[in-house]
Protein backbone atom coordinates (compact mmCIF):
# COMPACT_ATOMS: atom_id res chain seq x y z
CA UNK A 1 0.00 0.00 0.00
CA UNK A 2 1.56 3.39 -0.99
CA UNK A 3 2.48 5.77 1.80
CA UNK A 4 1.52 9.43 1.97
CA UNK A 5 3.34 11.77 -0.42
CA UNK A 6 6.02 14.17 0.75
CA UNK A 7 4.64 16.61 3.32
CA UNK A 8 5.61 20.32 3.22
CA UNK A 9 7.09 20.12 6.72
CA UNK A 10 9.44 17.35 5.60
CA UNK A 11 11.14 19.78 3.21
CA UNK A 12 10.42 23.20 4.74
CA UNK A 13 11.35 24.17 8.32
CA UNK A 14 9.88 27.38 9.73
CA UNK A 15 11.69 29.44 12.38
CA UNK A 16 9.02 31.77 13.81
CA UNK A 17 11.46 33.75 15.96
CA UNK A 18 13.31 34.82 12.82
CA UNK A 19 10.39 34.57 10.35
CA UNK A 20 12.34 32.53 7.83
CA UNK A 21 11.59 29.31 5.95
CA UNK A 22 14.57 26.96 5.59
CA UNK A 23 14.81 24.31 2.89
CA UNK A 24 16.14 21.31 4.80
CA UNK A 25 17.45 19.72 1.61
CA UNK A 26 19.40 22.77 0.38
CA UNK A 27 20.22 24.05 3.90
CA UNK A 28 19.44 27.72 3.44
CA UNK A 29 16.41 30.00 3.80
CA UNK A 30 14.22 30.68 0.77
CA UNK A 31 13.24 34.25 -0.04
CA UNK A 32 9.43 34.58 0.24
CA UNK A 33 9.11 35.71 -3.37
CA UNK A 34 11.15 32.73 -4.63
CA UNK A 35 9.44 29.78 -2.90
CA UNK A 36 7.45 28.57 -5.91
CA UNK A 37 10.45 28.85 -8.24
CA UNK A 38 12.68 27.06 -5.71
CA UNK A 39 10.26 24.13 -5.42
CA UNK A 40 9.92 23.83 -9.18
CA UNK A 41 13.51 24.38 -10.34
CA UNK A 42 15.51 22.91 -7.47
CA UNK A 43 13.26 20.07 -6.26
CA UNK A 44 11.22 19.51 -9.44
CA UNK A 45 7.94 19.68 -7.58
CA UNK A 46 5.51 20.63 -10.31
CA UNK A 47 2.21 22.49 -10.20
CA UNK A 48 -0.17 19.75 -9.05
CA UNK A 49 2.00 18.84 -6.06
CA UNK A 50 3.37 22.34 -5.42
CA UNK A 51 0.00 23.83 -4.40
CA UNK A 52 0.08 22.15 -0.98
CA UNK A 53 3.57 23.51 -0.31
CA UNK A 54 2.53 27.01 -1.36
CA UNK A 55 -0.59 26.88 0.84
CA UNK A 56 1.60 25.96 3.78
CA UNK A 57 4.09 28.79 3.08
CA UNK A 58 1.35 31.39 2.57
CA UNK A 59 0.07 30.79 6.10
CA UNK A 60 3.45 31.67 7.60
CA UNK A 61 4.65 35.10 8.70
CA UNK A 62 7.77 35.47 6.53
CA UNK A 63 10.03 38.51 6.61
CA UNK A 64 11.75 40.16 3.70
CA UNK A 65 15.44 39.11 3.83
CA UNK A 66 16.63 42.60 4.73
CA UNK A 67 14.19 42.71 7.67
CA UNK A 68 15.02 39.30 9.15
CA UNK A 69 16.08 39.48 12.80
CA UNK A 70 19.41 37.73 13.18
CA UNK A 71 20.25 35.63 16.27
CA UNK A 72 22.24 37.25 19.04
CA UNK A 73 25.99 36.63 19.22
CA UNK A 74 27.16 33.24 20.43
CA UNK A 75 23.79 31.49 20.43
CA UNK A 76 23.73 27.80 19.51
CA UNK A 77 23.89 27.01 15.78
CA UNK A 78 20.49 26.88 14.13
CA UNK A 79 19.30 23.54 12.75
CA UNK A 80 19.55 22.79 9.01
CA UNK A 81 22.04 25.60 8.34
CA UNK A 82 25.73 24.80 7.66
CA UNK A 83 28.26 26.30 10.06
CA UNK A 84 31.32 27.93 8.52
CA UNK A 85 34.73 29.00 9.86
CA UNK A 86 34.84 32.79 9.55
CA UNK A 87 36.38 36.03 10.83
CA UNK A 88 35.13 38.91 12.97
CA UNK A 89 36.68 42.39 12.77
CA UNK A 90 38.10 43.49 16.14
CA UNK A 91 38.19 47.22 15.39
CA UNK A 92 36.29 49.20 18.02
CA UNK A 93 32.60 49.49 17.15
CA UNK A 94 32.93 47.40 14.00
CA UNK A 95 30.75 44.32 13.57
CA UNK A 96 31.98 43.19 10.15
CA UNK A 97 31.92 39.42 9.51
CA UNK A 98 33.23 37.45 6.54
CA UNK A 99 34.48 34.02 5.53
CA UNK A 100 37.89 34.80 4.04
CA UNK A 101 41.08 36.65 4.92
CA UNK A 102 40.99 38.31 1.49
CA UNK A 103 37.60 39.88 2.27
CA UNK A 104 38.75 40.96 5.71
CA UNK A 105 41.81 42.70 4.28
CA UNK A 106 39.64 44.46 1.70
CA UNK A 107 37.36 45.59 4.54
CA UNK A 108 40.29 46.99 6.50
CA UNK A 109 41.65 48.81 3.46
CA UNK A 110 38.28 50.45 2.89
CA UNK A 111 37.08 51.10 6.46
CA UNK A 112 40.17 51.24 8.69
CA UNK A 113 42.86 52.52 6.35
CA UNK A 114 44.39 54.64 9.11
CA UNK A 115 45.16 51.51 11.13
CA UNK A 116 47.58 48.68 10.40
CA UNK A 117 45.89 45.48 9.24
CA UNK A 118 47.25 42.18 10.54
CA UNK A 119 45.84 39.00 11.96
CA UNK A 120 45.66 40.52 15.44
CA UNK A 121 42.87 42.79 14.19
CA UNK A 122 40.38 39.98 13.63
CA UNK A 123 39.49 36.73 15.32
CA UNK A 124 38.21 33.35 14.11
CA UNK A 125 34.52 32.69 14.73
CA UNK A 126 31.84 30.23 13.66
CA UNK A 127 29.30 31.73 11.26
CA UNK A 128 25.93 30.91 9.80
CA UNK A 129 23.74 32.74 7.28
CA UNK A 130 20.08 32.38 6.42
CA UNK A 131 20.35 33.42 2.80
CA UNK A 132 22.90 33.18 0.03
CA UNK A 133 23.86 35.40 -2.90
CA UNK A 134 23.19 39.13 -2.57
CA UNK A 135 21.17 38.58 0.64
CA UNK A 136 24.02 36.86 2.49
CA UNK A 137 24.31 38.19 6.07
CA UNK A 138 26.50 36.30 8.52
CA UNK A 139 25.89 35.95 12.24
CA UNK A 140 28.14 34.42 14.92
CA UNK A 141 27.16 31.17 16.62
CA UNK A 142 28.62 29.37 19.60
CA UNK A 143 31.57 27.15 18.73
CA UNK A 144 30.92 23.44 19.08
CA UNK A 145 33.28 21.36 21.18
CA UNK A 146 33.82 19.26 18.07
CA UNK A 147 35.13 22.16 16.02
CA UNK A 148 38.58 21.54 14.62
CA UNK A 149 41.07 23.01 17.02
CA UNK A 150 43.80 24.53 14.92
CA UNK A 151 45.43 27.95 15.38
CA UNK A 152 45.62 28.49 11.61
CA UNK A 153 42.24 27.12 10.64
CA UNK A 154 40.93 30.50 9.38
CA UNK A 155 43.92 30.91 7.06
CA UNK A 156 42.63 28.05 4.93
CA UNK A 157 39.41 29.84 4.01
CA UNK A 158 39.61 31.02 0.42
CA UNK A 159 36.01 31.69 -0.58
CA UNK A 160 33.34 34.12 0.53
CA UNK A 161 30.67 31.81 -0.83
CA UNK A 162 30.76 29.66 2.31
CA UNK A 163 30.15 26.58 0.21
CA UNK A 164 29.81 23.62 2.61
CA UNK A 165 31.55 21.42 0.03
CA UNK A 166 34.77 23.41 0.25
CA UNK A 167 35.05 24.87 3.75
CA UNK A 168 35.81 22.92 6.90
CA UNK A 169 32.53 23.16 8.85
CA UNK A 170 31.85 22.56 12.48
CA UNK A 171 29.42 19.78 13.17
CA UNK A 172 25.84 20.88 12.88
CA UNK A 173 23.55 21.09 15.85
CA UNK A 174 21.26 18.69 14.06
CA UNK A 175 24.06 16.13 14.09
CA UNK A 176 24.75 16.45 17.78
CA UNK A 177 21.11 16.52 18.84
CA UNK A 178 19.80 14.06 16.29
CA UNK A 179 17.50 11.50 17.87
CA UNK A 180 16.47 8.40 15.98
CA UNK A 181 12.90 8.92 14.79
CA UNK A 182 10.48 6.12 13.99
CA UNK A 183 11.30 6.59 10.32
CA UNK A 184 15.04 6.41 11.08
CA UNK A 185 14.50 3.13 12.94
CA UNK A 186 12.58 1.77 9.96
CA UNK A 187 15.44 2.78 7.65
CA UNK A 188 17.96 1.09 9.92
CA UNK A 189 15.87 -2.07 10.05
CA UNK A 190 15.56 -2.07 6.26
CA UNK A 191 19.34 -1.70 5.96
CA UNK A 192 19.96 -4.69 8.25
CA UNK A 193 17.34 -6.96 6.67
CA UNK A 194 17.55 -5.98 3.01
CA UNK A 195 20.10 -3.36 1.89
CA UNK A 196 23.08 -5.09 3.50
CA UNK A 197 22.21 -8.28 1.62
CA UNK A 198 22.29 -6.35 -1.66
CA UNK A 199 25.69 -4.70 -1.14
CA UNK A 200 27.55 -7.70 0.26
CA UNK A 201 29.00 -10.08 -2.30
CA UNK A 202 29.37 -13.08 0.05
CA UNK A 203 28.19 -14.28 3.45
CA UNK A 204 31.11 -12.82 5.42
CA UNK A 205 30.72 -9.35 3.90
CA UNK A 206 26.97 -9.41 4.39
CA UNK A 207 27.66 -10.19 8.06
CA UNK A 208 30.01 -7.18 8.32
CA UNK A 209 27.33 -4.88 6.91
CA UNK A 210 24.55 -6.46 8.96
CA UNK A 211 26.31 -6.66 12.32
CA UNK A 212 29.61 -4.78 12.57
CA UNK A 213 28.66 -1.63 10.66
CA UNK A 214 25.45 -0.87 12.65
CA UNK A 215 27.42 -1.23 15.89
CA UNK A 216 29.98 1.29 14.58
CA UNK A 217 27.18 3.53 13.38
CA UNK A 218 25.91 3.83 16.95
CA UNK A 219 29.29 5.36 17.90
CA UNK A 220 29.97 7.47 14.79
CA UNK A 221 27.20 9.84 13.75
CA UNK A 222 28.48 10.30 10.18
CA UNK A 223 28.33 6.54 9.58
CA UNK A 224 24.83 6.33 11.08
CA UNK A 225 23.55 8.95 8.66
CA UNK A 226 25.43 7.31 5.80
CA UNK A 227 23.69 4.02 6.57
CA UNK A 228 20.29 5.71 6.73
CA UNK A 229 20.95 7.56 3.45
CA UNK A 230 21.92 4.33 1.69
CA UNK A 231 18.82 2.58 3.02
CA UNK A 232 16.61 5.43 1.77
CA UNK A 233 18.16 5.27 -1.70
CA UNK A 234 17.53 1.53 -1.79
CA UNK A 235 13.88 2.14 -0.91
CA UNK A 236 13.69 4.82 -3.62
CA UNK A 237 14.77 2.16 -6.10
CA UNK A 238 12.34 -0.43 -4.76
CA UNK A 239 9.33 1.91 -4.64
CA UNK A 240 9.26 4.18 -7.74
CA UNK A 241 5.96 5.78 -6.65
CA UNK A 242 7.70 7.08 -3.50
CA UNK A 243 11.04 7.82 -5.13
CA UNK A 244 11.01 11.57 -4.56
CA UNK A 245 10.25 11.24 -0.87
CA UNK A 246 13.00 8.69 -0.24
CA UNK A 247 15.50 10.63 -2.34
CA UNK A 248 14.88 13.70 -0.20
CA UNK A 249 15.30 11.68 2.99
CA UNK A 250 18.58 10.28 1.64
CA UNK A 251 19.80 13.79 0.77
CA UNK A 252 18.96 15.07 4.25
CA UNK A 253 20.94 12.31 5.97
CA UNK A 254 23.85 12.70 3.56
CA UNK A 255 23.92 16.46 4.16
CA UNK A 256 24.35 15.77 7.87
CA UNK A 257 26.93 13.01 7.38
CA UNK A 258 29.32 14.68 4.94
CA UNK A 259 30.49 17.65 7.09
CA UNK A 260 31.26 15.28 9.97
CA UNK A 261 33.01 12.84 7.64
CA UNK A 262 35.22 15.62 6.23
CA UNK A 263 36.32 16.53 9.76
CA UNK A 264 37.16 12.92 10.68
CA UNK A 265 38.84 11.99 7.40
CA UNK A 266 41.60 14.49 8.09
CA UNK A 267 42.94 12.15 10.77
CA UNK A 268 42.29 8.47 10.09
CA UNK A 269 43.37 6.45 13.11
CA UNK A 270 42.74 3.15 14.86
CA UNK A 271 39.62 4.52 16.56
CA UNK A 272 37.84 5.77 13.47
CA UNK A 273 39.32 3.96 10.45
CA UNK A 274 36.72 1.15 10.46
CA UNK A 275 33.85 3.69 10.40
CA UNK A 276 35.60 5.88 7.80
CA UNK A 277 36.21 2.95 5.47
CA UNK A 278 32.62 1.75 5.77
CA UNK A 279 31.32 5.24 5.04
CA UNK A 280 33.65 5.50 2.04
CA UNK A 281 32.09 2.37 0.56
CA UNK A 282 28.58 3.70 1.23
CA UNK A 283 29.59 6.97 -0.40
CA UNK A 284 30.64 5.17 -3.59
CA UNK A 285 27.29 3.38 -3.68
CA UNK A 286 25.56 6.71 -3.04
CA UNK A 287 27.39 8.31 -5.98
CA UNK A 288 26.31 5.58 -8.40
CA UNK A 289 22.74 5.42 -7.12
CA UNK A 290 22.21 9.18 -7.05
CA UNK A 291 23.19 9.31 -10.73
CA UNK A 292 19.95 7.53 -11.58
CA UNK A 293 18.04 10.73 -10.84
CA UNK A 294 20.71 13.43 -11.14
CA UNK A 295 21.09 14.73 -14.65
CA UNK A 296 23.87 17.08 -13.56
CA UNK A 297 26.66 14.50 -13.35
CA UNK A 298 29.40 13.48 -15.76
CA UNK A 299 29.07 14.53 -19.39
CA UNK A 300 25.61 16.01 -19.11
CA UNK A 301 26.78 19.59 -18.91
CA UNK A 302 28.35 21.63 -21.64
CA UNK A 303 31.73 20.74 -23.13
CA UNK A 304 33.61 23.25 -21.00
CA UNK A 305 32.45 21.63 -17.76
CA UNK A 306 35.36 20.10 -15.85
CA UNK A 307 33.62 17.69 -13.51
CA UNK A 308 34.62 14.04 -13.26
CA UNK A 309 32.39 11.37 -11.72
CA UNK A 310 32.00 11.67 -7.95
CA UNK A 311 32.68 7.95 -7.48
CA UNK A 312 36.02 8.31 -9.27
CA UNK A 313 37.19 10.94 -6.79
CA UNK A 314 36.03 8.88 -3.81
CA UNK A 315 37.67 5.65 -4.96
CA UNK A 316 41.01 7.23 -5.84
CA UNK A 317 41.13 9.22 -2.60
CA UNK A 318 40.35 6.16 -0.48
CA UNK A 319 43.45 4.45 -1.85
CA UNK A 320 45.69 7.10 -0.30
CA UNK A 321 44.17 8.49 2.87
CA UNK A 322 44.25 5.19 4.78
CA UNK A 323 47.90 4.34 4.09
CA UNK A 324 49.03 5.25 7.60
CA UNK A 325 46.63 2.73 9.21
CA UNK A 326 46.59 0.10 6.46
CA UNK A 327 48.56 -2.52 8.48
CA UNK A 328 45.88 -2.32 11.18
CA UNK A 329 43.01 -2.38 8.66
CA UNK A 330 44.36 -5.58 7.14
CA UNK A 331 43.72 -7.36 10.44
CA UNK A 332 40.04 -6.38 10.50
CA UNK A 333 37.03 -8.04 8.82
CA UNK A 334 36.35 -4.74 7.02
CA UNK A 335 39.40 -5.21 4.82
CA UNK A 336 37.14 -7.33 2.60
CA UNK A 337 34.92 -4.28 2.04
CA UNK A 338 37.72 -2.46 0.27
CA UNK A 339 39.26 -5.44 -1.53
CA UNK A 340 35.98 -7.19 -2.40
CA UNK A 341 36.96 -9.88 -4.86
CA UNK A 342 40.56 -8.71 -5.22
CA UNK A 343 41.95 -10.85 -2.40
CA UNK A 344 42.67 -13.66 -4.84
CA UNK A 345 44.43 -11.42 -7.33
CA UNK A 346 47.49 -13.62 -7.23
CA UNK A 347 45.36 -16.33 -8.80
CA UNK A 348 44.69 -14.10 -11.79
CA UNK A 349 48.20 -14.35 -13.23
CA UNK A 350 47.02 -17.02 -15.64
CA UNK A 351 44.65 -14.46 -17.15
CA UNK A 352 47.20 -12.02 -18.54
CA UNK A 353 45.06 -11.77 -21.67
CA UNK A 354 41.33 -11.80 -22.22
CA UNK A 355 39.03 -12.85 -25.02
CA UNK A 356 38.68 -9.17 -25.87
CA UNK A 357 42.39 -8.50 -26.49
CA UNK A 358 42.08 -8.41 -30.26
CA UNK A 359 39.35 -5.78 -30.12
CA UNK A 360 41.32 -3.74 -27.58
CA UNK A 361 44.48 -3.86 -29.70
CA UNK A 362 42.56 -2.07 -32.42
CA UNK A 363 42.36 0.97 -30.15
CA UNK A 364 46.12 1.44 -30.34
CA UNK A 365 45.55 2.83 -33.85
CA UNK A 366 43.78 5.73 -32.14
CA UNK A 367 46.77 6.67 -30.01
CA UNK A 368 49.62 5.72 -32.30
CA UNK A 369 51.74 8.88 -32.66
CA UNK A 370 53.09 10.12 -35.97
CA UNK A 371 56.78 10.02 -35.06
CA UNK A 372 57.68 12.53 -37.75
CA UNK A 373 55.45 15.17 -36.19
CA UNK A 374 55.42 14.23 -32.52
CA UNK A 375 57.52 16.17 -30.02
CA UNK A 376 58.70 14.71 -26.73
CA UNK A 377 56.37 17.08 -24.90
CA UNK A 378 53.40 15.80 -26.88
CA UNK A 379 54.42 12.22 -26.17
CA UNK A 380 54.61 12.94 -22.43
CA UNK A 381 51.38 14.95 -22.22
CA UNK A 382 49.13 13.11 -24.67
CA UNK A 383 50.22 9.79 -26.13
CA UNK A 384 51.87 8.31 -23.02
CA UNK A 385 48.87 8.80 -20.67
CA UNK A 386 46.52 7.34 -23.30
CA UNK A 387 48.79 4.38 -24.03
CA UNK A 388 49.14 3.70 -20.32
CA UNK A 389 45.36 3.92 -19.78
CA UNK A 390 44.74 1.49 -22.66
CA UNK A 391 47.31 -0.97 -21.33
CA UNK A 392 45.71 -0.84 -17.87
CA UNK A 393 42.28 -1.26 -19.48
CA UNK A 394 43.48 -4.41 -21.25
CA UNK A 395 44.69 -5.81 -17.91
CA UNK A 396 41.38 -4.80 -16.30
CA UNK A 397 39.50 -6.90 -18.87
CA UNK A 398 41.74 -9.86 -18.01
CA UNK A 399 41.17 -9.40 -14.26
CA UNK A 400 37.43 -9.09 -14.83
CA UNK A 401 37.44 -12.32 -16.82
CA UNK A 402 39.37 -14.05 -14.03
CA UNK A 403 37.04 -12.74 -11.31
CA UNK A 404 33.98 -13.77 -13.29
CA UNK A 405 35.40 -17.28 -13.64
CA UNK A 406 35.47 -17.46 -9.80
CA UNK A 407 32.01 -15.85 -9.52
CA UNK A 408 33.73 -13.05 -7.61
CA UNK A 409 33.29 -10.07 -9.95
CA UNK A 410 32.25 -7.10 -7.80
CA UNK A 411 32.05 -3.33 -8.02
CA UNK A 412 35.36 -3.11 -6.18
CA UNK A 413 37.08 -5.29 -8.82
CA UNK A 414 35.63 -3.15 -11.62
CA UNK A 415 36.64 0.14 -10.04
CA UNK A 416 40.04 -0.78 -8.59
CA UNK A 417 41.44 -2.44 -11.72
CA UNK A 418 41.13 0.62 -13.97
CA UNK A 419 39.85 3.95 -12.53
CA UNK A 420 42.21 3.72 -9.57
CA UNK A 421 45.17 2.70 -11.74
CA UNK A 422 45.08 5.31 -14.54
CA UNK A 423 47.36 8.32 -14.28
CA UNK A 424 46.33 11.83 -13.34
CA UNK A 425 47.47 12.94 -16.79
CA UNK A 426 44.84 10.67 -18.35
CA UNK A 427 42.19 12.08 -16.01
CA UNK A 428 43.21 15.59 -17.08
CA UNK A 429 42.60 14.59 -20.71
CA UNK A 430 39.26 13.08 -19.72
CA UNK A 431 38.31 16.19 -17.81
CA UNK A 432 39.09 18.25 -20.93
CA UNK A 433 36.80 16.00 -22.99
CA UNK A 434 39.66 14.77 -25.19
CA UNK A 435 37.94 12.40 -27.69
CA UNK A 436 40.33 9.45 -27.36
CA UNK A 437 40.17 9.63 -23.56
CA UNK A 438 36.37 9.53 -23.79
CA UNK A 439 36.52 6.55 -26.16
CA UNK A 440 38.63 4.60 -23.64
CA UNK A 441 36.12 5.43 -20.91
CA UNK A 442 33.35 4.20 -23.23
CA UNK A 443 35.11 0.83 -23.52
CA UNK A 444 35.44 0.71 -19.73
CA UNK A 445 31.62 0.84 -19.62
CA UNK A 446 31.69 -2.77 -20.87
CA UNK A 447 33.22 -3.78 -17.52
CA UNK A 448 30.36 -2.09 -15.65
CA UNK A 449 27.69 -3.87 -17.65
CA UNK A 450 27.81 -7.17 -15.65
CA UNK A 451 27.10 -5.18 -12.47
CA UNK A 452 23.74 -3.88 -13.69
CA UNK A 453 21.93 -6.43 -11.51
CA UNK A 454 22.97 -4.41 -8.44
CA UNK A 455 20.24 -1.88 -7.60
CA UNK A 456 22.64 1.06 -7.32
CA UNK A 457 24.21 0.28 -10.73
CA UNK A 458 20.92 -0.17 -12.60
CA UNK A 459 21.24 1.48 -16.02
CA UNK A 460 24.52 3.24 -15.17
CA UNK A 461 26.63 1.89 -18.05
CA UNK A 462 23.94 2.89 -20.56
CA UNK A 463 23.63 6.39 -19.13
CA UNK A 464 27.38 6.93 -19.07
CA UNK A 465 27.89 5.58 -22.59
CA UNK A 466 25.02 7.70 -23.93
CA UNK A 467 26.60 10.80 -22.45
CA UNK A 468 29.97 9.96 -23.98
CA UNK A 469 28.33 9.40 -27.37
CA UNK A 470 26.63 12.81 -27.18
CA UNK A 471 29.94 14.50 -26.32
CA UNK A 472 31.78 13.14 -29.37
CA UNK A 473 31.68 14.60 -32.86
CA UNK A 474 30.42 12.37 -35.66
CA UNK A 475 33.93 11.46 -36.85
CA UNK A 476 34.74 9.74 -33.51
CA UNK A 477 31.48 7.83 -33.00
CA UNK A 478 32.38 4.77 -35.14
CA UNK A 479 34.95 3.88 -32.47
CA UNK A 480 32.05 3.29 -30.06
CA UNK A 481 30.48 0.52 -32.14
CA UNK A 482 31.71 -2.30 -29.90
CA UNK A 483 30.71 -0.71 -26.54
CA UNK A 484 27.30 0.24 -27.96
CA UNK A 485 26.81 -3.32 -29.17
CA UNK A 486 27.93 -4.90 -25.87
CA UNK A 487 25.77 -2.65 -23.72
CA UNK A 488 22.74 -2.93 -25.96
CA UNK A 489 22.34 0.62 -27.23
Image (spheres, grey):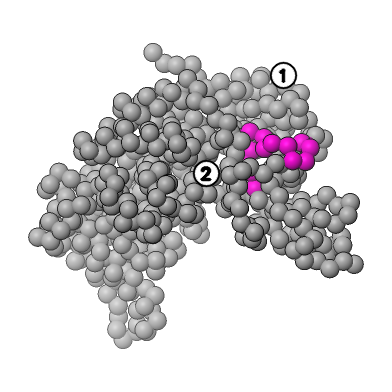
489 over 186 or under it: above or below: below
The part of the chain drawn in magenta is 70-84
Q: How many marks?
A: 2
Q: What secondary structure characterizes most of the magenta part?
A: loop
Specify whether 262 is left or right of 29.
left
Q: Is residue 37 visible?
A: no
**Which sits earlier in the primary sequence, circle 1 or circle 2?**
1
Q: In the picture provided, is 393 more to the left or to the right than 285?
A: left
x 79%, y 34%: residue: 68
Q: Is residue 113 magenta?
A: no
Residue extending farthest to the left is 350
**In percent of the image, x 38 and y 59: which residue is there?**
324
Say which residue label 2 marks.
260
Question: What percent of the width, then of the height, locates residue 354?
Answer: 13, 58
Q: Tell me the crowding category of disc 2: few under 14, some 14 to 19, or many 20 or more residues within 10 angstroms, Cα based.
A: many
Q: Quadrant of residue 358?
A: bottom left
**Image x and y of residue 214, in percent:** 37, 33
User: What SS does tag 2 mark?
Assistant: helix
Residue at left 48%, top 37%?
221
**Any magenta on residue 83?**
yes
Identify whether 54 is placed above or below 117.
above
Q: Which mark is residue 368?
A: none
Image quadrant holding the N terminus, namely top left
Per the image, the residue denoted by label 1 is 59
Of helix, strand and loop, which one carries label 1? loop
Residue 370 in percent (x, y) is at: 30, 80
| Residue drawn at point x = 12 percent, y = 56 percent | 347
Amino acid sequence: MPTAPLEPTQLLHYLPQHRVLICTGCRYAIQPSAISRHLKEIHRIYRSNRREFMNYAEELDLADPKNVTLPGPNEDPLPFLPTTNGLSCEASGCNYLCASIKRMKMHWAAEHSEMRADDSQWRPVDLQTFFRGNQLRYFIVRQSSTTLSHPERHSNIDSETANPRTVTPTLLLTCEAHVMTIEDLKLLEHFKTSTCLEIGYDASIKHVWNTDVPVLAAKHSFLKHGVLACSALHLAFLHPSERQRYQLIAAQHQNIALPQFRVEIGNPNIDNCFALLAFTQLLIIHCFSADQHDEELLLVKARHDLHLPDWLHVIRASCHIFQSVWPYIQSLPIVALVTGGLESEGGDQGFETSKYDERLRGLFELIKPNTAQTTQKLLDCYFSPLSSALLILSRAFAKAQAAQSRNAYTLWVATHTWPVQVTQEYLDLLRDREPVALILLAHYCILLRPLEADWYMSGYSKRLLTRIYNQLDEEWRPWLHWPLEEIGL
